[in-house]
């Protein structure tokens, strides 16, 4: 006598080549949102796939790329909302790829293609799980909704209006986030939240034209100097951000959060090897390193540009300088507060000339570690992997999860098909075949657990 | 009864079209040192021109482009050394030129071409002056030497060894520098010195690869932050350079220097219009603005580069950052001292990770305002322009003049064919025809004054 999950496994094994084919087909559509390529054909194909497993799917217009929305009722009233995206990052630089980025290539136990991890692999694994569960149980145990946007890789500019216009339609009891990952040993990792982000461009113009540094070096303001001095006031060398009241709304990690962090394996050596560092900021290690990674807000200079940047010497005094600065926020910091604090701070320090442009912003959001959904996720992982997943109370990254957690009001978990070597956003993006299979199984197990809770 | 200078004028007028033709021919040879173009043909043509006015000219090899060296004896033992260069800046960006940069174009009273001011116009004007003076006097009143290098626009990397190997040959009593200029009204301007320069690249690498700012923002060092913090320590917002002992060897301007500065017309408004500033550094104006312009050493950020610099957002934590920093030095500061001070300063402030690369260096040098040569220059200007030139005790710019002032041991003056709108190093480089003519006359008058002193 076999269990339902064993029958799910058998179905997945039997149909695995078909799912690989579907993934390859999706990866062959270059749905690069930043370049406006292949977006509509990809959306249409995704809707077809959802229809093929019995969901009622449609393309819904936004001011940008359409959202693929799909739903199906289940035996129970419980509903699971899946957030995914069908757009991908640009594949450039092409010359760093070992195979054509839009032709999924199998090499040993790897599947390689742009989007194979982020986010087409996840999407196909969820469709496969639905097919398997319906085959085994004859019906869906819980209702399913899919919100699959086409602009995730360009910072979801039209997601908030879409969600606000469809709050009733999107109501659900649980949400599976777009990504999910595994460590090098194939152990699943789940993140229970994302930091917020406030991504700014800071710019200054001190003259109409660049000047000769010999003629003007002692008499004209220099945009690069203004920017350096202004940036310097934002964070001290002890990594403390200097904006007024910046830390006021930070909620310290709870004892439960620290317990979760303590339960995670150390990754210090692995990270040092990857980045070639001899030490981490503030000499952190172990649990403290992990605490810093997710619970400390940041002020990162992502880029600076001014004046001459070529070889040799050009004796120019730059009229313009700018920097990209990315604040990562923890609950309950708000990006709009950061912008206000920054303006006040610059003005108080005499930097009225530094112009602030908000490039992107989103609030942090978390799901409580003790929410029953987290236990269901853990149980499903035990079913599939024979062990509990690694649970991070939050991720250092950011995304539009506040719209789901807060505006829709649904708890969020992550599960998926990626791993620590997936090279998401980089050349040679890849997943491991076994993680792809386990991602399908984990999703199927979650559906069955939710249906029997 | 005409004076010798009137006969010189008549000769120049009679042969002016020929000199225009020679200038056009030189400008048509694209002797761009940075791109290795047309260098040898230009050097050969310049040697021919010098031979044609009776000088003994030769190409002398260096480790780079050859030097054109020429000399001729005069009636007197007095010798004038002319420093010029036959190489030019690149013409790029071509699309900003209103006419082909390598076809000298006449438009109203302007001659337009790459190199027409810097430095081919000056060179041809000096050859024309020699021809005119020899025609009028039947001989050269003083000896003449020309050192015409082919690498001035790439920072003269082989000039010092050439000079040191030929110190005896280059001995002279006076030196005319490569450039000379006029104000908008055609009044000649002479500079009696140049600031030194110490042009550095400061760079830092904090990891092997760029990282995701969400993952690593709170735990990994950021090269851009390291560079901003390090740069910030170099100069305070009151424009005071913070290196230890930086100002120790600065010689304050003398009462005579200040007298010269006071005699110059204010250029505040003209500069404000050009650069679009509402105020100069430290609110300087008038004499104090001019004092700052040439007698204050500088620390100019000429460029900074790190991380992402494109449109929109990329959430990257940069592993590398670098800046080009240009110190202008006044007597008796030395570039090698600045490099030592900077290393000591960085080390004292914990910036052992900031790497210093010397891109270019040269010491400041001046000719004393009361040197008899300066009076000869003034007298020659009165002969030609009917008024004294504007005398700056120093220029804010830099050049290899220390090699001449100190190593050869010759006093230096400037006279030439440029003007404030010459767009040297920029598209649409040009001179005014009348300045070209007056530059010839001024040089001829100087030769005759030196011969009768």
Image (tube, coloured by chain):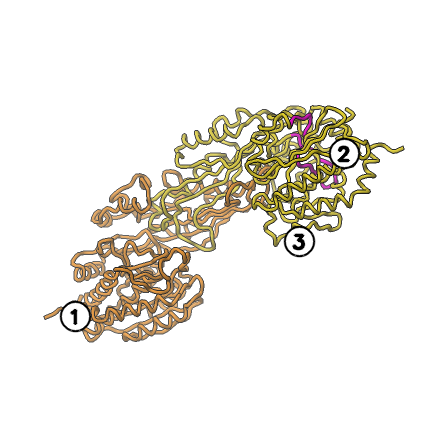
Chain colours: A orange, B yellow
Q: Are marks 2 and 1 on the same chain?
A: no
Q: Which mark is residue A7?
A: 1
Which secondary structure lies at badge 1?
A: helix
Residue assigned mark 2 = B444
x, y percent for residue B158? 56, 35
Q: Does residue A406 lie above or below B77 as drawn?
A: below
Q: Residue at x 75, y 50 (%)?
A: B108
Magenta stretch, residue numbers: B170-192
Looking at the rendered structure, the secondary structure element under dot 3 is loop
Instruction: Work out which quarter of the rendered image holds the N terminus of chain B and state it.
Output: top right
x and y percentages locating residue A301 in the rendered image: 42, 46
- Chain under label 1? A
Q: The residue tagged with tag 2: helix, strand or loop?
A: helix
Q: Chain of mark 2?
A: B
Quadrant of image for the C terminus of chain B: top right
Q: Are marks 2 and 1 in contact (CB under 8 Å)?
A: no
Q: Which marked residue is nearer to the observer: mark 2 or mark 3?
A: 2
Label 2 neighbour load within 10 Å: few <14, some 14-19, many 20+: many
Nearer the observer: mark 2 or 1; the answer is 2
């Amino acid at each position: 006598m076999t269990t339902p999950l064993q029958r799910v496994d058998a179905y997945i094994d039997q149909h695995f080549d078909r799912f690989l084919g579907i993934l390859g087909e999706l990866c062959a559509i270059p749905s690069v949102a930043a370049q406006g390529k292949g977006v509509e054909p990809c959306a249409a194909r995704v809707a077809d796939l959802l229809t093929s497993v019995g969901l009622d799917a449609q393309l819904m217009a936004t001011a940008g790329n359409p959202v693929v929305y799909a739903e199906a009722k289940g035996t129970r009233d419980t509903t699971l909302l899946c957030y995914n995206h069908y757009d991908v990052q640009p594949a450039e630089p092409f010359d760093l790829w070992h195979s054509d980025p839009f032709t999924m290539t199998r090499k040993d136990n790897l599947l390689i293609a742009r989007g194979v991890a982020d986010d087409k692999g996840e999407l196909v694994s969820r469709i496969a799980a639905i097919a398997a569960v319906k085959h085994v149980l004859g019906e869906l145990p819980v209702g399913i909704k899919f919100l699959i946007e086409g602009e995730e890789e360009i910072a979801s500019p039209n997601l908030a209006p879409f969600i606000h216009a469809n709050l009733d339609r999107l109501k659900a009891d649980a949400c599976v986030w777009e990504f999910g990952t595994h460590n090098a040993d194939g152990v699943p990792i789940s993140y229970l939240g994302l930091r917020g982000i406030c991504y700014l461009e800071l710019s200054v113009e001190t003259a109409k034209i660049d000047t000769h540094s010999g003629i003007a070096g002692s008499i004209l303001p220099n945009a690069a100097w203004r920017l350096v001095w202004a940036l310097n006031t934002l964070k001290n060398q002890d990594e403390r951000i200097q904006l007024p009241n910046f830390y006021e709304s930070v909620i310290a990690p709870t004892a439960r959060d620290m317990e979760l962090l303590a339960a995670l394996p150390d990754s210090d050596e692995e990270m040092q090897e990857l980045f070639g560092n001899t030490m981490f900021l503030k000499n952190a290690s172990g649990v403290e390193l992990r605490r810093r990674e997710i619970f400390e807000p940041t002020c990162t200079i992502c880029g600076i540009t001014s004046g001459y940047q070529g070889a040799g010497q050009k004796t120019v005094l730059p009229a313009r300088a700018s920097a990209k600065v990315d604040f990562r926020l923890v609950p309950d910091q708000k990006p709009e507060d950061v912008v206000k604090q920054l303006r006040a701070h610059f003005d108080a320090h005499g930097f009225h000339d530094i112009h602030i442009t908000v490039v992107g912003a989103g609030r942090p959001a978390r799901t409580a570690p003790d929410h029953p959904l987290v236990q269901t996720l853990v149980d499903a992982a035990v079913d599939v992997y024979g062990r509990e997943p690694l649970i991070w109370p939050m991720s250092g990254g950011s995304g539009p999860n506040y719209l789901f957690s807060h505006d829709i009001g649904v708890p969020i978990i992550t599960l998926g098909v990626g791993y620590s070597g997936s090279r998401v956003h980089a050349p040679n993006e890849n997943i491991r075949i076994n993680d792809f299979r386990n991602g399908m199984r984990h999703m199927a197990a979650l559906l069955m657990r939710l249906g029997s809770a």
